[in-house]
């Protein structure tokens, strides 16, 4: 079996025992952790599986470092090296970043609904739409598929990215009060799309701070 097929098999087994006592779930997680990164999920009633570094998850993870204490511009570090700088507009929900010598832009495409596009020049590479104004969630479409970005739980700032039921990305702050964060994605996801997802999460964090 391919690594993804193996991960899907583990996920299927997890769902079949979701109603079993917690000891069974814990045993399954311990077995799966030998080859996968397993994240408990009460919302799904089972476990989510993120491919480990041997099977597609990029390690070391990305580190997001704010330019300053009050800034929403971020340096994106990988293995101690800056690979991108996210420059967010001070007024409108826009951002730009450069990767591998190419410049990309993120802009809001609608006024009434929170819809955003990732663009390289005039070419749209990915789009994200918020299905509800009352939910911290985005539905993403790219040339390679459809994804869902949603919080890990109602009370947490951590966000997870799903391809169907498969967990393929995660962005989480290092502390409950700070802005420094980490991000990790399945290796097959293009870097510009990874940064697009990061920009969306930063926007949601900033909105939450402004409402507080």
Image: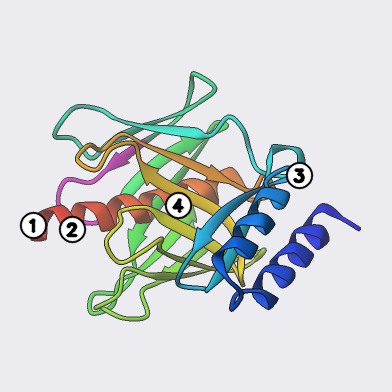
Q: Disc 4 marks which residue?
A: 196
In this view, the residue farthest toward the right is 1
Mark 4 crowd level (few <14, some 14–19, many ≥20, 10 Å Cα): many
First in residue order: circle 4 vs circle 3 = 3
Q: Are marks 2 and 1 in contact (CB under 8 Å)?
A: yes
Question: Residue at the spot x=60%, y=74% of the render?
Answer: 18
Residue 118 position, x and y percent, is 46, 57
Q: CA distance from mark 2 to mark 1?
A: 6 Å
Q: Looking at the picture, does residue 101 appear above or below residue 40?
A: above
Left/right placement of residue 89 relative to residue 15 reads left
SS class of the residue under badge 2?
Answer: helix
SS of the residue under disc 1: loop
Q: Which residue appears at 34% of the width and 58% of the height?
A: 107
Q: Which label sits in the foreground, 2 or 4?
A: 2
> Majority secondary structure of the magenta segment?
loop
**Residue identifier under label 3:** 55
Q: Can you see residue 125?
A: no
Spatial CA span between label 1 and label 3: 40 Å
- Residue 72: quarter of image: top left
Between residue 7 and residue 77, name the one nearer to us.
7
Mark 1 and mark 4 lie on one chain; the one further toward the N terminus is 4
Give the CA separation, mark 1 to mark 4: 25 Å
- Residue 187, percent across and down? 67, 44
Nearer to me, 94 or 47: 47
Residue that label 2 marks: 208
Does the magenta run of residues contain 72? no
Residue named by callout 1: 212
Mark 2 crowdedness (10 Å alpha carbons): few <14, some 14-19, many ≥20 = few
Q: Which is nearer the N-term, disc 3 or disc 2?
A: 3
Residue 209: image location, x then y, percent:
14, 53
Q: Earlier in the sequence, mark 2 or mark 4?
A: 4
Q: Which residues are magenta?
A: 86-93
């Amino acid at each position: 079996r391919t690594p993804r097929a193996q991960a899907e098999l583990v996920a299927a087994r997890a769902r079949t025992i979701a109603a079993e006592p917690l000891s069974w779930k814990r045993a399954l997680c311990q077995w799966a952790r030998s080859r996968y990164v397993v994240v408990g999920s009460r919302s799904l009633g089972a476990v989510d599986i993120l491919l480990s570094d041997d099977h597609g998850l990029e390690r070391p993870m990305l580190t997001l470092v704010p330019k300053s204490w009050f800034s929403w511009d971020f340096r994106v570090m990988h293995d101690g090296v800056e690979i991108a700088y996210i420059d967010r507009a001070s007024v409108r929900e826009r951002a730009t970043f450069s990767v591998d010598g190419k410049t990309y832009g993120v802009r809001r495409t609608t006024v009434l609904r929170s819809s955003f596009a990732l663009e390289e020049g005039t070419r749209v590479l990915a789009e994200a739409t918020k299905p509800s104004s009352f939910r911290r969630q985005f539905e993403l479409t790219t040339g390679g598929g459809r994804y869902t970005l949603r919080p890990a739980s109602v009370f947490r700032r951590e966000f997870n990215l799903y391809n169907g039921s498969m967990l393929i990305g995660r962005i989480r702050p290092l502390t409950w009060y700070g802005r420094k964060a980490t991000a990790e994605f399945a290796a097959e996801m293009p870097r510009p799309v990874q940064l697009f997802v990061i920009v969306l999460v930063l926007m949601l964090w900033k909105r939450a701070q402004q409402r507080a």
